Image (cartoon, rainbow, N blue to C red):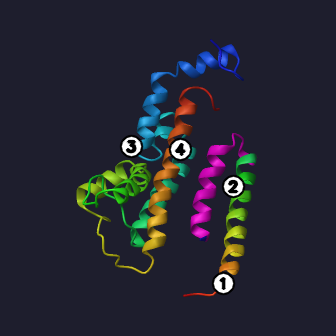
Amino acid sequence: MTLFAAIVSVVFGAVARDKGRERVLYGLKIFAEFMGIGLVLAWLLYFLPGS
Amino acid sequence: MAEKGLSREESVRAESAPAKAWLAAAAAWLVPGAGHLLQGRVLRGLLLGGAVWAMFIIGLRLGGHLFPLAGPYDDGLSTLLQVPPVIANLGAGVLYLFCLLTRTGFTDQASLATYEYGNTFLLVAGLLNYLIMLDAFDIGAGRKP
């Protein structure tokens, strides 16, 4: 998940913003969102009864 | 006639994208990163192309499955359900075509426990390359710095 988030964040950051600093900040934001949402969903699913 | 929300100059520029923009987009699709490299955006090309190449290769190493252009698919709805992943896989350009020619990654039987992660990596690699292709086109058309 970390690797996936890192690669996608690099592409999104480079494509969606035009200036260097904005790119880095946007990439970091996307990475943090991927990781945060992924961890929250993982914990939610952990408490759901499995098959 | 100017489109709604665009100035006349922007509208004219949008309608008449130069041939180099189309060439850059085609190169970007065929070889991930090449569209930017052709336009002298070396760092950006290496970064974006490297991301797609890395994602595709990691996907294959994780045991991911590529969807073939033509069957054997069942008739009916299941055939239609195969179309979106084929379009996503096709986005990887030469990476997909190479695998198609060498029959790499097309086995139906999952050999690794991580194959679903691999599938996701392969699909997203193609989809990201579509984004990169549009970026290369915009640069060629002068819509992006």
Residue for badge 2: A27
Tell me the residue that label 3 is attached to: B30
**For the residue carrying disc 3, how many other residues have a C-alpha within 10 Å: few (<14), some (14-19), or many (20+)?**
many
Q: Amino acid at mark 4?
A: Ile
The numbered mark 2 sits on a residue in which chain?
Answer: A
Foreground residue, B134 or A7?
B134
The residue identified by callout 1 is A48
Expressed as whole percent of the image width and height from the top left, the position of residue A37 reads: 70, 68
| Residue at the image point whose x is 49% and y is 21% from the top | B18
Q: Secondary structure at mark 2?
A: helix
Expressed as whole percent of the image width and height from the top left, the position of residue B26 reads: 41, 36
Which of the pair B33/A39 is nearer the observer? A39
Amino acid type, residue under disc 1 in the picture: Leu
Question: What secondary structure predominates along the stretch shown in magenta?
Answer: helix
* Amino acid type, mark 2: Gly
For label 4, the residue is B132
Q: Are marks 4 and 3 in contact (CB under 8 Å)?
A: no
Say whether residue A40 is left or right of residue B43.
right
Give the spatial CA distance, label 4 vs label 1.
38 Å
Callout 1 crowding tier (Cα within 10 Å): few <14, some 14–19, many ≥20: few
State the image quarter where residue B95 is shown: bottom left
- Residue B6 position (above or below residue B57): above
| Secondary structure of residue under mark 4 | helix
Q: Position of residue B10 (x, y in %)?
A: 65, 19
Give the alpha-carbon distance from disc 2 to disc 1, as whole Å. Answer: 32 Å
